[in-house]
Image (tube, rainbow, N blue to C red):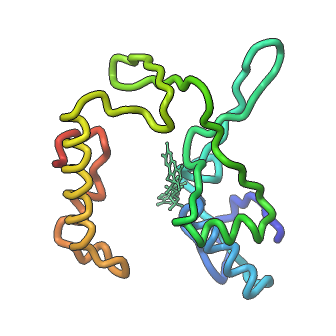
Amino acid sequence: MEVRKSTNKAEESDVIVIGCGLSGLTAAYEIFKIEPNTNLCLLEAKDRLGGRTLTHEIDIGDGQKAKFDLGGQWVASSQPDILEILEELNIETYPQFIDGTKVMQVGHNNVIRTYQSDIPSLGSFWGVIELQLFIWKAERLAKQISIEDPYSWDQAQEYDAMTMDHGNVC
Ligand SMILES: Cc1cc2nc3c(=O)[nH]c(=O)nc-3n(C[C@H](O)[C@H](O)[C@H](O)COP(=O)(O)OP(=O)(O)OC[C@H]3O[C@@H](n4cnc5c(N)ncnc54)[C@H](O)[C@@H]3O)c2cc1C
């Protein structure tokens, strides 16, 4: 597949894919597999591809650099579609390294905590209760939404415009 940047607004395309995160790129890839001669136009608002996946090279001292994922990075057996495409594209996966002491920076005041368990403790019994209440609420809301037509839900616009920073969703 030939990929090039275009500034020609008048160019004609067979298919226009809007958004070049994993969904848009996968859609374009699937179309390309079916019909390689399709004149595909991928429109992306940002100056990079990948959407919510983002890998940054960070200086780790001694003149060395390492790659860190700042967005999506883990896959699990509950994600058969993405596992299938990774295999098809020969993209390697490896188990998450979880031995030893982990360091986590959380909250607005950037508190740094360490822990030994596989996943961090939520700190308090009430934290666990709050998380479970949030999960129940999210599952209840998800049941009201049609996967085929999510915008038919009467609160779709309100929730779609909401970020995690909006705070009190529960
Ligand atoms: C910090 C973080 C960690 C995560 N960790 C994981 C993980 O470990 N495992 C996992 O499975 N998932 C993880 N996710 C979620 C995963 O990254 C996303 O579900 C996935 O990347 C979403 O892909 P998408 O293409 O659907 O949407 P996006 O990645 O959001 O892509 C949408 C793209 O469309 C563009 N766009 C939007 N509107 C327009 C427009 N009008 N015109 C042109 N372009 C437009 C946006 O700029 C963006 O590039 C994580 C997400 C984050 C933020």
Instruction: Name the quadrant containing residue 24.
Output: bottom right
Percent coordinates x, y for residue 146 in the rendering: 30, 78
Q: Total label count?
A: 0
Q: Which of 84 and 37 is in front in this view?
A: 84
Q: Which of 65 and 155 is in front in this view?
A: 65
Q: Which residue lies furthest to the top in this view?
A: 62
Considering every residue shown, the one lying at the far bottom of the view is 34
The quarter of the picture where residue 26 lies is: bottom right
Please state if 107 lies on the left or on the right of 55 as rendered: left
The quarter of the picture where the N terminus appears is: bottom right
Closest to the observer: 47 or 112? 112
The residue depicted at 62 percent of the width and 80 percent of the height is 15
- Picture quarter containing residue 153? bottom left
Query: In the image, what residue occupies the spot 45% across and 23% down?
Result: 105
Query: Looking at the image, which is closer to me, 66 or 27?
Result: 66
Relative to 40, 106 lies left or right = left
Q: Could you tell whether 131 is left or right of 43 in the image?
A: left
Q: Name the residue rendered at 21%, 65% in the picture.
A: 141
54 over 99 or under it: above or below: below
Residue 159 in picture, x, y percent from top left: 24, 57
**Residue 58 x %, y %:** 70, 26
**Residue 128 rendering spot, x and y as whole percentages:** 25, 40
